[in-house]
Image (spheres, coloured by chain):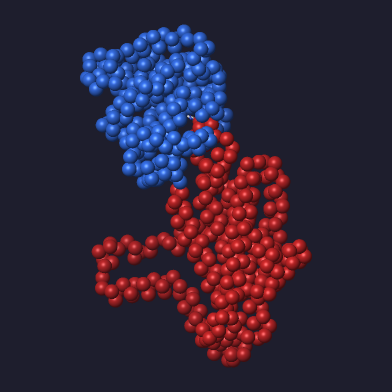
Chain colours: A blue, B red
Amino acid sequence: MSSVLQQASVTAPSTGSTREIALTGVAKTYPLKRGASVTALAGIDLEIADGEFVALLGPSGCGKSTVLRIVAGLEQPSTGTVSVGGASPQALSKAHRLGVAFQEHSLLPWLTVRQNITLPYKVAGRPVDTAHVRELIDLVGLGGFEDARPKHLSGGMRQRASIARALVLDPDVLLLDEPFGALDAVTRRRMNKELARIWAELRITTLLVTHDVDEAVLLADRVVVMTGRPGRIRHIEGIDLPLREHTELTRSPEFHEIVDRLTGMLETTKAA
Amino acid sequence: MTESITTERAVVDQAAEELLERPGPAATETPAARRRNPLQVVGRILAAIVVRYWPIIAMLIAWPVWLWANGYSRAVAPGPLDVATDLVQHPDVYLLPVLWTALFAIGGLLLGMLVGIVLGVLVWMSPLVSGLLLPSALILRVVPVTAMIPILAALFGYGSGTVVVMVVILVFFPAFSLTVSGMSSVSQSSRDLFAVLGSGLAARVFRLHLPAAIPSIMLALRISAPVGILGVLLAEYLLSGVGLGDLLRTAGERLEYEREWAAALVATVLSVICFGLARTAERRVVDRVT
Ligand SMILES: Nc1ncnc2c1ncn2[C@@H]1O[C@H](COP(=O)(O)OP(=O)(O)OP(=O)(O)O)[C@@H](O)[C@H]1O
Ligand SMILES: [Mg+2]
C-alpha cells in the first residue's frame, strides 16, 4: 500500500486531494553578521502525498528543522516554492488545519496541561470538545496531571503535552520535530505505537523529524535521509513492511535490514 | 527610549532587592547547625531585625538625644514618646484620614495601572497609536506633577478628582512602558506556536502577549505603590480637605507638632505596607505565570 502512495507522491498532480505537500527546488540561506551567510538547505525536492507519513533523518544541523519550518510557513524559502494542498502553508495555518509539535515544547507557562491542550480551540474560536481533550490526555499518558503547570512536569511530559496539543484539532497536516526526543526508550515505543494507531485511523499527512532510525522505519511510509552543509536529500527509502502496528515487526529481519542500511548511511554521512 | 527610563528604574530596584535578599555568610550553615535551643532562635531573630532595620532603631535613639542636645522643648519638636502618646490617645483623629489616603492611593494606583496597560497594549499593537501617544506620554512623564496642579485643579476641581488624577499621572508611565516591553519579550517559539495555530491579533494579544507581560506589569505595580501614596499625600497637602496630607498641613498650621509628626509616621507606615503588599502580590502572581 505504501508503494502505491509512494508512486502517487511521485506523479501526483496538485489537483484532487487537498493535503499534499510539495517542496520544489527549495534552498534556504540565513544571513549572518557582516554580510556572511549560511546555506542551510540547497535544492530540496520533496513531495508528500495526501495521507502519507514521511520521516526525516539526518545528522544534527543538516537542516531538518528548517525543512519543517518552511512547510509550517514559519520561514520563506530563499529560492524554490512550497505548497500545501495547492496553497501556501500560511493558508493552512489560517484555516486551523495544521498541527505542529516543535523541537522545543513551547507550552505556555501560565496555563495548565489541560488549558495548553485546549489552546488551539480557543485560538480558532471553536467550542472545546472536552471528551476529545480527555481522550488525548489519556492517550499521551498525562492523566492525573491535567491541572499541573508545565514547570512542574518533566521534559518528556512536556513533549507529550505538546503532541496532544498538535493533535487536538484533528489537523490535515501534522509536523513533528523530534517529538519523542526527551522520552525514555520504553515510553518512546509506547508513544510510537499510539501514534501509529491514531495515524492508521486518521491518515493525517505527516512529516516527522527524528534521530531514531527504528522510529522512522516503524512509523513512516518513506524515510528521507539528509546530508548536511548544505542540507540536501541523500536518499529516499520506501518502507513496505506488513503489520505496521504489530509488536513483532521490530523483531523481523526485513525491519532490521532496513534499519541497518539507513544507520550505515547516516554514519557515512557524518564521516563525510 | 521610553522603555529605558522605567526599565532603568526597575533594574535599580531589582538590584537593590537582590542585594537585600542575598544570603549572608550565615546562610551557608547546615540546617542541623541551625536547630538549637529556643533562646538562640530568639537571639537570631533579634539579630536579624537589628541587621535589617538598624537605621530605624538608630533614629529612635538619636531623635531624643538630638532634642536634648539642642535643648528643644516640646513646643519646638516633639519626642518619640509625645508622638506615640498622641497616636494612642486620639486614634480617631488618624483613622479617617488613613482610610481616605489609602482609598485614594489604591483607587488611583489601580486606575493608573489600567490606563498604563491599555495604552501599552494600544501602542504595542499599532505604530500609528504609538506615534500619536508617545510624545504626550513623555511630556506627562517629564513635567513635574506639582507644576501641573493649577491646571489639574482648574479641570477637576480642588477635591478628590484632582487627587486621583495626580496619582494616575504619576503611576501610568511605568505600567505603560513595562507593558510594552513585557509584551515584546515573548519568545520566538511561542510566536511560532501562535503563527501555526493561525491566531488572529486579538488571540495573540490576550492569550499570548498580555499574559507574558504580567511579570513586567506586576513589577510596575511594585514600583508604583509607594509613588501612589506620595502622590496622594502631596495632592491632599496642597488641595483637598481630607486625608493624611490634609492632617499634616492642618496640624502644622495649628502648631500641633506631635500630631504632625505622628501623621508623618503613619504615612510612612502606610507607604511601607503598600509596598509590602504590592511585593507579595508580585511574587504570588509571578510564581503563578512563569
Ligand atoms: N535562524 C537562523 N539563523 C541562522 N542560521 C540558522 C537559523 N536556523 C538554523 N540555522 C542554521 O541552519 C542549519 C540547519 O539548522 P536546523 O535547525 O534546520 O538543523 P537540524 O537538522 O534541525 O538540527 P538538529 O537535529 O540539531 O535539530 C544550521 O547550520 C543552523 O546553524
Ligand atoms: Mg532541529
Q: Is residue A76 left or right of residue A215?
A: right
**Does residue B211 lie above or below A67 as drawn?**
below
**Does residue B36 lie above or below A259 as drawn?**
below
Count the numbered circles shown. Answer: 0
| In front of the other: B282 or A269 | B282
**Screen quadrant of the C terminus of chain A:** top left
| Residue B6 position in % (x across, y down) | 60, 55
Which quadrant does ligand 1 occupy?
Answer: top left
**Does residue A42 lie above or below A104 as drawn?**
above
Q: Residue at x 74, y 67 (%)?
A: B157
Q: Is residue B195 left or right of residue B133?
A: left
Q: Is residue B1 left or right of residue A119?
A: right
| In front of the other: B158 or B42 | B158
Q: Which quarter of the figure has residue B246?
A: bottom right
| Residue A59 position in % (x across, y down) | 37, 24
**Screen quadrant of the N terminus of chain A:** top left
| In front of the other: B15 or B202 | B202
| Residue A258 position in % (x across, y down) | 29, 15
Q: Which quarter of the figure has residue B200?
A: top right
Q: Which quarter of the figure has residue A262?
A: top left
Q: Residue at x 45, y 73 (%)?
A: B53
**Is residue B271 visible to the viewer in this orientation of the structure?**
yes
Q: Residue at x 57, y 53 (%)?
A: B7
| In front of the other: B260 or A270 | B260
| Residue B140 position in % (x across, y down) | 70, 57
Q: Residue at x 61, y 54 (%)?
A: B114
